[in-house]
């Protein structure tokens, strides 16, 4: 259980520190570099932990074949998930939110948004939660349940609960509980491919599409 308490303590400290940084954004330095500080913390804290423990980082692709495998799973998952998601989101906006019909909004800064989501959001979050946290918890809990060809266990559930909770703790929004569900998919992709490439790409795609979709209903 030493690994379990290690993960819990480090994660709690990071979440509290992120909350402190978030509420301190009115100060010039934090306000200007908040995203960079966040990314550095969630990337380098686990790197330091691995270095201290003399443990290899085993969730990064080490070959072109591994990267292509992650890319293929990302593309297939996107086709399977995003089509029904867009339909459900449209119905929600029209019949629940009472928004007018869908009107495709321009997205002039799409590449800037994609790069930001990749480097400052998806990569650090997946590196920490799916790479470090889920990977470490895999050494604590057995993966005794097989789901869609992958052995999974409590590590995915615990990581997803903490992942969703951390968003609301830093900045509360009523819908943050729903982050739990895509987090499960991020975790499954990490287990299926053995790396965080697919989770990072899919995570970034989720954020970009969601951001754009909101602007299409007024």
Image (cartoon, rainbow, N blue to C red):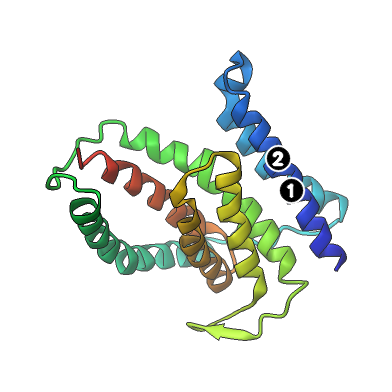
> In the structure shown, which secondary structural element does the residue marked by tag 1 occupy?
helix
Q: Marks 2/1: CA distance?
A: 6 Å
The N terminus sits in image quarter:
bottom right
Give above or below for 106 relative to 145.
above
Query: Where residue 56 sits: x, y (%)?
Result: 77, 59
Query: Mark 2 Cα within 10 Å, few/some/many (few <14, many 20+)?
Result: some
Q: Residues within 10 Å of mark 1 (few under 14, many from 20)?
A: few
Instruction: Examine the image and state in which quarter residue 212 appears.
Output: top left
Residue 15: horizontal and vertical position, in percent? 68, 43
Kindly identify the residue that appears in the image at 55 percent across and 46 percent down. 168
Q: If the image is split into quadrants, where does the C terminus sit?
A: top left
Secondary element at image label 2: helix
Residue 214 vertical placement versus 89 (above, below): above
Viewer can see residue 62: no
Residue 72 percent coordinates (x, y): 40, 66
Q: Residue furthest top?
A: 28
- Residue corresponding to mark 2: 16
Left or right, 26 with respect to 132, comes to: left
From the viewer's perspective, tell me whether residue 146 is left or right of residue 155. Answer: left
Q: Which mark is residue 12?
A: 1
Give above or below for 19 relative to 11. above
Q: Nearer the viewer, residue 203 or 159?
A: 159
């Amino acid at each position: 259980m030493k690994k379990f308490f290690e993960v819990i303590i480090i994660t709690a400290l990071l979440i509290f520190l992120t909350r402190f940084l978030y509420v301190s954004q009115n100060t010039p330095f934090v306000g200007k570099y908040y995203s960079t500080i966040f990314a550095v913390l969630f990337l380098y804290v686990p790197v330091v932990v691995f270095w201290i423990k003399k443990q290899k980082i085993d969730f990064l692709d080490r070959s072109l074949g591994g990267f292509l495998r992650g890319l293929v799973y990302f593309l297939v998952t996107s086709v399977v998930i995003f089509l029904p998601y867009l339909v459900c989101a449209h119905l929600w906006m029209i019949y629940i939110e009472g928004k007018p019909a869908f009107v495709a909004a321009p997205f002039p800064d799409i590449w800037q948004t994609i790069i930001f989501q990749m480097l400052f959001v998806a990569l650090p979050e997946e590196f920490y939660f799916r790479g470090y946290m889920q990977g470490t918890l895999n050494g604590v809990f057995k993966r005794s349940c097989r789901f869609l060809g992958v052995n999974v266990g409590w590590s995915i559930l615990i990581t997803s609960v903490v992942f969703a909770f951390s968003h609301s703790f830093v900045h509360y929004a009523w819908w943050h509980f729903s982050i739990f569900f895509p987090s499960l998919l991020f975790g499954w992709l990490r287990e299926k491919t053995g790396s965080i490439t697919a989770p990072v790409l899919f995570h970034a795609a989720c954020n970009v599409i969601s951001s754009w979709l909101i602007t299409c209903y007024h």
